[in-house]
Amino acid sequence: MPLMYTAIIILILVVCFLLALVVLAQNPKGGGISSQFSAGGAASMMGVKRTGDLLEKLTWGFAIGLVVLSLSTHMLTRSTAGPVRSVNQERALETKLPAPAPAPGAPAPGASAPAPANTAPVQPTAPAPAPAPTPAK
């Protein structure tokens, strides 16, 4: 697949170069953009006066070829593994959010229920050592 992708990219570059040459070789057919807003500009679409012109046909052919080649690169890079995610979306999925605060009057998430009245209280044990800090990336 990388060889096909590279070949299409090279074809796109060649078509872009040829399209630029064909556009630069054309004679100006009007007053540019200002003629499009005047009354005479409505008669000739995009400044074209002769439809049988070879340069015009080449321009349209190269433009359509460029669109087709660009869409084909998208078809080659599409993966079937699932939706493509950006780097920011991947990082957002990897981060852990803090636990929500408990509701007032509710026991804390790590706390046990109150002991029944007829049992002896449990003696607290020594706290567990804190985990070592991990180095930042």
Image (cartoon, helix red, strand yellow):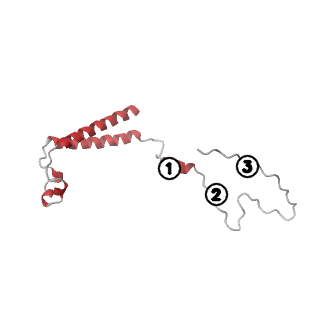
Q: Considering only order in the chain, which callout, 1 or 3, is on the residue closer to the N terminus?
A: 1
Q: Considering only order in the chain, which callout, 3 or 2, is on the residue closer to the N terminus?
A: 2
Q: Which residue is mark 2?
A: 99
Crowding near the residue tagged with mark 2, few <14, some 14–19, many ≥20 C-alpha atoms within 10 Å: few
The x and y percentages for residue 117 are 85, 65
Under mark 3, the amino acid is Ala
Q: CA distance from mark 2 to mark 3?
A: 19 Å
Q: Secondary structure at mark 2?
A: loop
Side (left or right) of 35 relative to 5: left
Q: CA distance from mark 3 to mark 1?
A: 31 Å
Q: On residue 130, which mark appears?
A: 3
Q: Secondary structure at mark 1?
A: helix
Q: Considering only order in the chain, which callout, 1 or 2, is on the residue closer to the N terminus?
A: 1
Residue at 64% from the left image edge and 57% from the top image edge: 99
The x and y percentages for residue 70 are 33, 42
Side (left or right) of 91 relative to 63: right
Under mark 2, the amino acid is Ala
Quadrant containing the N terminus is top left
Q: Secondary structure at mark 3?
A: loop
Residue at 20% from the left image edge and 42% from the top image edge: 24
Residue at 34% from the left image edge and 43% from the top image edge: 71
Residue 131 in view in this figure: yes
In this view, the mark in front (3 or 1): 3
Whether 82 is drawn above or below 2: the answer is below
Residue 1 in view in this figure: no
In this view, the mark in front (2 or 3): 3
Whether 103 is drawn above or below 23: the answer is below
Q: Which residue is mark 1?
A: 88
